[in-house]
Image (tube, rainbow, N blue to C red):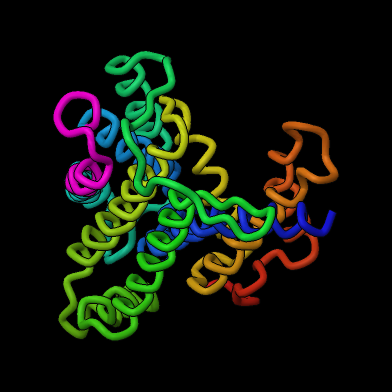
Amino acid sequence: MLLDLLYFTLLGLMTGGLYALLGLSLNLVFGVMRVINVSHGEMLTLGAYTAVLMGMVFLPSPWIAIPAAIAVVTIAGFLIARLLLAPITREGRVDEQRGLVLTLGLSFVIANLILAAFGPEYQKVPGKLAEGAYVIGDLVLEKQRLVILVSCVVLAAALMLFLKYALLGRAIRAVGENPEAAQACGINVRRIHVLTFTLGSALAGISGALITPATNAAPSMGFSYTLYAFSVIIVGGLGSMWGAVFAGFLLGVAESVSVLWLPSGYNAVVGPLLMLATLIVRPQGLFGRTTARA
């Protein structure tokens, strides 16, 4: 039993790295733009299917397909922010209701375009990110999943360092804190919004490209990952970067370990239950502020 607990905890940490990166990127968009981006999971789907297409038609190596996915999703995120979100920005703020409806419609459009292009069948990138496994006693850990975990942790750390030390990162934080004051200081708020949405979309696209060699891609997968991302930011706290990281790993471990006690397939309810419990006990999230910004 102890060995099983250790094994599923390690698996949960690997999954939690992906959840943390997704939650972190979604929280970045919300924290700066105050847009509830319902299409965030579809950015992951777009990255996954770009990797699938590259692997099937052009280059079989997933390591070569990943840069292509990053490029495609980055361009898609830029176009969405520039052509769709910028027109509904007034006085440095995106209209929250219009932004929500727009991203909701966008999620359906992207999912159905992928369905029309690839069909409903599950797809997978040929090859693996890393061959073999580490054997520690009776524990067998796939190198591929470890690569995904390390990649997600490195990307999350790079994002947080960028926001803390880089000049553009500080500008992003300034706009998130007070767009009017940031604009008065000479910061182009609309450009920062475009950069933020593009960066958040790119991170979601990277996530999709990373996991596709380890799992199957489906046109509807974005909805599930959007729910995971929202669970992470609600548990961790809206606008809290460290909260998203902690909640991502917490959700991953809780979901994985629950397999030991719940019937098969019921571990999917762990995320919603954890989110519901957080809303009841601490509505602002574990690391969220007690008062909302005016």
- Using the image as rendered, state which of residue 244 and residue 82 is in the foreground: 244
Quarter-of-image position of residue 160: bottom left
User: Where residue 176 appears, x then y in whole percent?
Assistant: 37, 73
Q: Is residue 202 above or below residue 48?
A: below
User: Where residue 140 appears, x then y in whole percent?
Assistant: 60, 51
- Using the image as rendered, state which of residue 178 and residue 222 is in the foreground: 222
Q: Does the segment drawn in magenta span residue 104?
A: no
User: Where residue 182 appears, x then y in whole percent?
Assistant: 26, 80
* Residue shown at the point (25%, 78%) measured from the top left: 171
Q: What stretch is highlighted in magenta?
A: 55-71
* Residue shown at the point (65%, 68%) measured from the top left: 284
Q: How many marks?
A: 0
Q: Please give left or right for residue 165 compared with residue 204 in the image.
A: left
Q: Characterize the magenta stretch by its predominant secondary structure.
A: helix
Q: Please give left or right for residue 195 compared with residue 112 in the image.
A: left
Q: Can residue 83 be seen in this view?
A: no
